[in-house]
Image: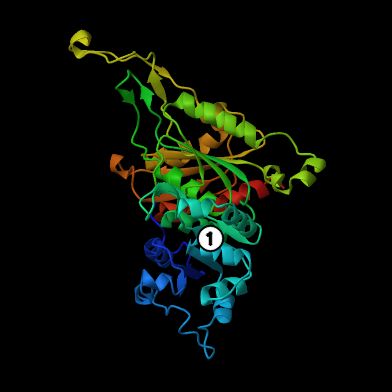
């Protein structure tokens, strides 16, 4: 996923780094923040400076690093002014020692003083030896921080600096970036709303080694799902193509053929539409209000129109098939047309190659499929598939809006803004 240069434009981020070997990953994290348009100011503990010099972070961020040696009360360069300046604070890596001090409001270095002075949500990415992290007191400290305005980005299991393999390695920079961006970009409309996104071209087996498919890359679906995740939605991405750079905490289901996609989609819709919640239930679980919001479906998958009439076990042999072979096909199920759409808002995606008939076909799709909106994409040729940019016309029964060519993630945010109006149109 290409991170847009405008994704975090004008956002102000404190990046706090402590004395862990994982601090080298924080250089990449700082680069991601800067690349996305954010202004980043780094605060370092003295232990962190043993691994990476302040000059390295200053070069990446174009801002002076704050540490225990250079606090200045004649400018912003102190722990109070820095805490007042920021939109969010990210502590990555956070050692077991730092976690323990944060949980007990100890502020015996400049980094901890900034953290104590910063009143809003803080993103915390632990990094420690497995035994140190799993120690009961360390676990109790993390639980304390989780209810004290900290969002914990889980560690991962891999070979650690101590040459043992276990849970304790800091999360990857991209995962920390996504959790930070999600906190900064949350939208009340999408927050906690259940949303399903389908993507990729379905893979319809002929035999155990051959299949029918199409050129759909799944990139647009991935971008829409990522934009929804960053807006705070409870996303379920059902796709034939799942890349490694999607948000780790986004719910993802890999499917192959249209039947499998249909099965998981129907199940997801059923869960999203589960009955009305009683007031007593709401009082017991305040977070369950999310399912009171109308679910959305973005159907970006390219589902095969026809599939093999039968699937051969094993591998078809050309010496048995002969010089000519006719493959029998049958019409596939129309997933979008056949699913129960009552109680959900549905946005379909349509790719067309004939600009003369494209708009008419997209408009007809609204009525024929019983959906609320269509994202029309006019392709130039087969090389248009898999590109990192797109141009969309967002069409409803009432009007249409042309969304100019842009990176797919950036374009997805524009699609979501237009999709908001689908719910208000019912009022």
Q: Which residue is mark 1?
A: 124
- For this view, does 202 lie left or right of residue 99? left
Is the residue 93 above or below the residue 264 in the image?
Answer: below
Is the residue 48 above or below the residue 340 in the image?
Answer: below
The extreme bottom residue here reads 74
Query: Image point 56% across, 69% down: which residue?
Result: 87
- Residue 137: x and y in percent read 60, 56
Q: Is residue 321 visible?
A: yes
Which sits in the foreground, 185 or 202? Answer: 185
Query: Image point 49% across, 22% down: which residue?
Result: 333
Q: Quadrant of residue 4?
A: bottom left
Which sits in the foreground, 345 or 274? Answer: 274
Which sits in the foreground, 176 or 228? Answer: 176
SS assignment at label 1: strand
The extreme right residue here reads 280
- Residue 99: x and y in percent read 55, 62
What sort of colour scheme is used for the picture? Answer: rainbow
- Residue 132: x and y in percent read 50, 55
The extreme top residue here reads 320
Which sits in the foreground, 215 or 250? Answer: 250
- For this view, does 177 lie left or right of residue 294? left
Query: Image point 33% across, 48% down: which residue?
Result: 387
Q: Quadrant of residue 150?
A: bottom right
- For this view, does 47 lie left or right of residue 346? left
Q: Is residue 181 visible?
A: no
Q: How many marks?
A: 1
- Residue 6: x and y in percent read 45, 64
């Amino acid at each position: 996923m290409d991170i847009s240069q405008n994704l975090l434009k004008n956002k102000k981020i404190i990046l706090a780094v402590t004395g862990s070997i994982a601090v080298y990953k924080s250089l990449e994290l700082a680069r991601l923040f800067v690349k996305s348009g954010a202004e980043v100011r780094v605060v370092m503990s003295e232990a962190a400076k043993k691994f990476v010099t302040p000059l390295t972070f200053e070069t990446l961020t174009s801002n002076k690093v704050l540490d225990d040696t250079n606090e200045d009360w004649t400018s912003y360069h102190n722990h109070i002014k820095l805490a007042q300046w920021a939109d969010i604070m990210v502590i990555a890596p956070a050692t077991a020692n730092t976690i323990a001090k944060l949980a007990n409001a100890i502020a015996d270095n400049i980094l901890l003083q900034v953290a104590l002075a910063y009143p809003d949500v803080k993103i915390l990415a632990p990094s420690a030896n497995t035994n140190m992290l799993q120690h009961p007191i360390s676990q109790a400290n993390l639980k304390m921080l989780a209810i004290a305005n900290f969002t914990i980005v889980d560690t991962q299991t891999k070979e650690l600096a101590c040459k043992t393999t276990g849970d304790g390695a800091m999360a990857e920079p991209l995962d920390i970036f996504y959790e930070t961006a999600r906190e900064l970009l949350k939208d009340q409309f999408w927050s906690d709303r259940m949303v399903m996104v389908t993507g990729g071209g379905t893979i319809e087996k002929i035999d155990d080694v051959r299949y029918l498919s199409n050129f759909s890359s799944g990139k647009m679906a991935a971008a829409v799902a990522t934009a929804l995740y960053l807006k705070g939605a409870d996303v379920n991405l059902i796709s034939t193509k799942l890349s490694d750079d999607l948000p780790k905490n986004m719910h993802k289901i890999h499917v192959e053929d249209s039947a499998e996609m249909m099965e998981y989609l129907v199940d997801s819709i059923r869960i999203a539409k589960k009955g009305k919640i009683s007031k007593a239930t709401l009082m017991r679980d305040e977070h369950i209000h999310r399912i009171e919001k109308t679910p959305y479906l973005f159907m970006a998958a390219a589902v095969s129109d026809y599939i093999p009439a039968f699937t051969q076990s094993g591998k078809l042999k050309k010496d048995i098939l002969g010089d000519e072979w006719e493959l029998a096909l049958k019409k596939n199920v129309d997933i979008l047309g056949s699913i129960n759409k009552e109680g959900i808002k549905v946005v379909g995606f349509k790719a067309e190659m004939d600009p003369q008939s494209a708009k008419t076909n997209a408009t007809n799709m609204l009525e024929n499929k019983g959906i609320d909106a269509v994202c029309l994409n006019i392709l130039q040729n087969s090389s248009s598939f898999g590109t990192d940019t797109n141009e969309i016309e967002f069409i409803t029964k009432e009007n249409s809006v042309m969304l100019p060519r842009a990176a797919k993630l950036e374009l997805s945010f524009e699609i979501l803004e237009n999709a908001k109006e689908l719910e208000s149109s019912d009022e």
